[in-house]
Image (cartoon, rainbow, N blue to C red):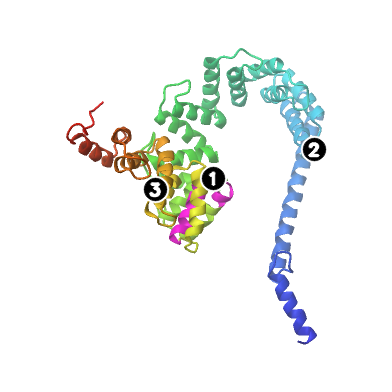
Amino acid sequence: MNRALAILLAAALLSAFPGGNAHPAESRKNRREQARREQARTEAQARERRVVSGCRKALQKDPQDLAAMVCLGDAYAGGRGIGKDEAEAVRLYRRAAELGSAEGRYALASRLVSGRGMAPDFAEGASWCRLAAEQGHPPSQSLLAFLHERGMGVPKDDGEALSWYRRAAEGGDVAAQKLLAWRYMEGRGVPGSPADAAAWYRRAAEAGEADAQTRLAALYREGVGVPQDDAESAKWYGRGAHGGSAEGFAGYGRALLYGRGVPQDEAAAGKWIRKAADRGVPEGTFLMGVLYAYGRTAPREEGEALAWFRRAAAEGYVDAQLQLAGMHLQGRGAPQDDREAFAGYRAAAQSGNPAAQAMIGWMYETGRGVPADAGEAVRWFRKAAGQGNLSAKEHLRYLERLPAPARIQPE
């Protein structure tokens, strides 16, 4: 082999491995992207310096300009356009607070509560926070609610906390809106109301909060608190995903994969699903198993599918527990093992899934994976039937028609 050919082959081999020389076009693209990032960073820093300069000039013109005072405090606190200096930020916030600025009072209260830039003092923090809250400042109202909820610097008072959370939410504080939504969904301190939960999630979602967008999408997907609507679900999942919600990645990926509420696009679905799985989202992990199990945007590979389903099942994802149990029961894509199947169905059944509860009933009825036990069978069938599972209702009718002493008496 001549020397020139050997050099060409070595270069080709190096470019095939990480750390090898990049293709000239790829290298140029990377340099352009790096240059764009550097330019954007330089422009952002220049804007921050202009903001600081403007705040300084405003304060020189009017030493009691509250907006400029808080603006400069924020710059010192974040090190934006000026050297980071928490002590100077606190000094400016305190001066603004003393002059009546709600923003200054909130910033000072936040630091007194957290101990950022100063020694923590819950009582003083709560005092400044209340002054700002009574001025109608939503973030301060939300913080005051939190302090009452935890009894930090103020008496612990759930009623007072709820009152301030509601005022903050009505004033547009998205954190308070999400918390109220959660309370209504779980019935924590308020009567359980999925419809009210959906309404509060919608307000936060419409304000652009990605997590709220994803939660609202999930309610539309399941028809909880709102009418079931695949198109609305896909719309809000899409907004949440593009806003950076990891759960949104998975929900939007599922919608694209099955074409529910949005045109089917398996290639795009695969990208969103992998992003969710990379972030450790159980639904994304489960959907990765689906992609490998059925060869959707990935080679069909039962071993890979099984590994992904096991990971999602271990994280408590019910769909994965059901899928894994079915695979073991049928010996399809996993070793046939009735006991493993029973364990999977039991995990899903204990989470309240009616299909899994019906399967547990059937396994007790037939002695698959566990000793036959008509009493346990009917107990699980009744749980599933109580949630409307038709198969469980049929099995119950059959068992209750059995002649004595095998007949199971109704409870």
Q: Which is in the foreground here, disc 3 or disc 2? A: 3
> Is residue 63 in view from this perspective?
no
Task: Say whether residue 278 is magenta.
Answer: yes
Question: Residue 338 shows which numbered tag?
Answer: 3
Report which residue position mark 2 lands on: 53
* Residue neighbourhood size for the residue with mark 3, other residues' Cα within 10 Å, grouped as few (<14), some (14–19), many (≥20): many
Which quadrant of the structure image shows residue 146? top right
Left or right: residue 70 compared with residue 265: right
> Is residue 400 in view from this perspective?
yes
Q: Position of residue 133 (x, y in %)?
A: 61, 20
Q: Mark 3 and mark 2: span between their CA atoms? A: 73 Å
Q: Nearer the viewer, residue 14 or 229?
A: 14
Q: From the image, which quarter does the N terminus lie in?
A: bottom right
Residues shaded magenta: 275-295
**Residue contact between numbered discs 2 and 1, judged by CB atoms under 8 Å:** no
Report which residue position mark 1 lands on: 281
* Residue neighbourhood size for the residue with mark 1, other residues' Cα within 10 Å, grouped as few (<14), some (14–19), many (≥20): many
**Helix, strand, or loop for circle 2?**
helix
Q: Which amino acid does the dot numbered 1 rest on?
A: Val
Q: Nearer the viewer, residue 156 or 410?
A: 410
- Residue at coordinates 71% horizontally, 75% vertically from top-left? 12
Q: Which amino acid does the dot numbered 3 rest on?
A: Asp
- Residue at coordinates 47% horizontally, 47% vertically from top-left? 251
